[in-house]
């Protein structure tokens, strides 16, 4: 091949490179530092409430203060709004007034899990169980025979709120949902995977020792008396509780080269942390930076803590009013990265993806122009102009990124918070970390892609 031929290819073809061919030693050390901090965050953020709590702790350590009505908001002021302990909005005030718009990144901190029902406790055959109702899109068969831990709150009649965490400490007990032994699994194994484990079969085994009396439900009585001793609660208190059973796996390095991270809840705490870390390092931006950690994305972004909630308008209009700017004008000129994970191409399952357009492990932050399903149905589909803006920012800041698509055409689909932001007349695009085994109890991401997502959002916050 002649030199001219080589040059014409370099000039005209779109060529992607493995991220490890693009990184120097210094950046590699920075990647390890960042990923170590992310892994610590993920390990202690097992629920949306914990992700918000940890987010606030980090933000406060970097100078963020709770927003209060009437406070002075000048360039560089860092404020946050804790929405009912379940979603979090942060801002760093920019040099330009909000009429120029804000740079917004929106991720979610809820993840698929098993919620306890409101009357969860029962005994069968002298074994005690918690009944659950799963939250978000799961393959139910993945949630049996793995260690589970319990996190959440119990709100008592007298107004007292009790925090519950069982299973996080090394010496804590854990819980499990049992499965049938293969020796007797002939009928079960002939069922479709969606029916192998039923929703009403997702019951946590929580005890087996009977109470020392001769009444009924002796194991259940023994279990509730243990809970009463530890938390001062009775069976009736479950009526006003939010208790979530989540996988008990610790976050860890994966692979001999330690290039991947295994853990529960990468979707979407991996992007939530990228935003948090980025906004915490944003000092004096030109445009106001806004970071959102939303709840309820996995069930449609509904409710007071979801991305459809008007708490977003409430927060933004407070900031706007302090400058005499109309909220409508601010949103119209804003730009939003809907920071959510995308699917990584999995060579184990090549048949569901289209290789030329799917995101690959170690190729950087995944940009999804559209999500949805069946002919882009239900997607906000970012415009060419919006993609062009991101290309400029990422090129100027050496952010390694790639295009992503959620599987083959007509293979399936999904959504994010993007459409709810776009419906508010904000230019919005999905961008985030490619994930293997998304929504499984133990998901996999690549450190390189985590780092590039953080770098990408940081560059976005710093943009004019
Ligand atoms: Mn997500
Ligand atoms: Mn998800």
Image: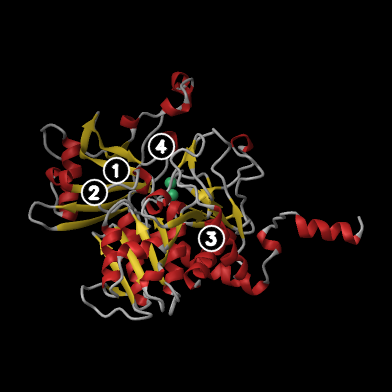
Marks 4 and 1 sit apart, C-alpha to C-alpha, by 15 Å
Marks 2 and 4 sit apart, C-alpha to C-alpha, by 21 Å
Q: What residue do we see at 28% from left, 57% from top? A: 86
Residue 290, compared with residue 345, is above or below; it is: below
Marks 3 and 2 sit apart, C-alpha to C-alpha, by 30 Å
Tell me residue 408's x, y (percent): 58, 37
Residue 185, compared with residue 48, is above or below; it is: above
Residue behind mark 2 = 242
Residue behind mark 1 = 115
Q: Is residue 451 left or right of residue 42?
A: right
- Asked if the residue under mark 4 is in contact with the one under mark 3, i.e. CB atoms within 8 Å, the reply is no
Mark 2 falls on what kind of element? strand
Residue nearer the viewer, 299 or 361: 299
Q: What residue do we see at 56% from left, 67% from top? A: 393
Q: What residue do we see at 33% from left, 49% from top? A: 296
Q: For disc 4, does the CB lie below 8 Å from ligand 2?
A: no
Mark 1 falls on what kind of element? strand
- The quadrant of the rendering that contains the N terminus is bottom right
Residue 364, compared with residue 32, is above or below; it is: above
Between circles 2 and 4, the one closer to the viewer is 2
Q: Is residue 422 left or right of residue 443?
A: left
Q: Is residue 147 left or right of residue 26?
A: left
Q: Residues within 10 Å of mark 1 (few under 14, many from 20)?
A: many
In the picture, the disc for residue 450 is 3
- Asked if the residue under mark 1 is in contact with the one under mark 2, i.e. CB atoms within 8 Å, the reply is yes
Residue 269, compared with residue 95, is above or below; it is: above
Residue behind mark 4 = 144
């Amino acid at each position: 091949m002649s030199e001219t031929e080589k040059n014409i290819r370099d000039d005209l073809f779109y060529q992607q490179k493995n991220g490890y061919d693009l990184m120097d030693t210094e950046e590699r050390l920075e990647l390890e530092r960042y990923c170590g901090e992310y892994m610590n965050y993920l390990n202690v953020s097992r629920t949306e409430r914990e992700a918000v709590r940890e987010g606030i702790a980090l933000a406060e350590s970097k100078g963020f203060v709770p927003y209060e009505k009437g406070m002075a908001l000048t360039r560089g002021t860092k404020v946050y709004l804790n929405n009912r302990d379940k979603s979090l909005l942060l801002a760093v005030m920019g040099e330009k007034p909000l009429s120029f718009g804000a740079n917004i990144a929106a991720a979610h901190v809820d993840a698929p899990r098993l919620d306890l029902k409101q009357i969860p406790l029962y005994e069968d055959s002298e074994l005690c169980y918690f009944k659950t109702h799963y939250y978000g899109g799961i393959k139910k068969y993945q949630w049996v025979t793995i260690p589970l831990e319990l996190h959440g709150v119990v709100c008592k009649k007298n107004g007292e709120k009790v925090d519950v965490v069982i299973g996080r400490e090394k010496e804590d007990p854990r819980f499990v949902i049992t499965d049938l032994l293969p020796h007797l699994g002939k009928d079960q194994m002939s069922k479709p995977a969606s029916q192998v484990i039923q929703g009403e079969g997702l019951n946590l085994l929580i005890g087996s020792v009977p109470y020392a009396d001769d009444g009924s439900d002796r194991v259940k009585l023994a279990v509730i008396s243990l809970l009463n001793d530890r938390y001062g609660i009775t069976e009736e208190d479950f009526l006003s509780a939010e208790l979530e059973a989540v996988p008990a796996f610790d976050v860890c390095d994966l692979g001999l080269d330690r290039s991947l991270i295994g853990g529960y809840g990468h979707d979407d705490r991996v992007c939530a942390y990228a935003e948090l870390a980025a906004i915490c390092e944003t000092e004096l931006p030109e445009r106001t930076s806004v970071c959102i950690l939303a709840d309820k994305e996995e069930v449609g972004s509904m409710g007071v803590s979801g991305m459809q909630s008007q708490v977003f308008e409430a927060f933004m209009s407070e900031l706007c009013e302090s400058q005499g700017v109309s909220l409508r004008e601010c949103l119209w000129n804003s730009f939003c990265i809907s920071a959510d994970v995308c699917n990584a191409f999995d060579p184990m399952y090549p048949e569901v993806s289209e290789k030329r357009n799917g995101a690959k492990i170690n190729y950087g932050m995944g940009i999804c122009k559209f999500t949805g399903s069946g002919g882009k149905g239900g997607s906000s589909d970012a415009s060419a102009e919006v993609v062009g803006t991101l290309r400029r920012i990422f090129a100027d800041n050496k952010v390694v990124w790639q295009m992503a698509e959620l599987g083959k055409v007509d293979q399936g689909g999904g959504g994010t918070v993007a459409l709810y932001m776009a419906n508010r007349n904000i230019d919005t695009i999905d961008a985030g970390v490619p994930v293997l085994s998304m929504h499984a109890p133990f998901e996999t991401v690549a450190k390189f892609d985590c780092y590039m997502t953080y770098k990408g959002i940081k560059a976005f916050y710093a943009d004019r």
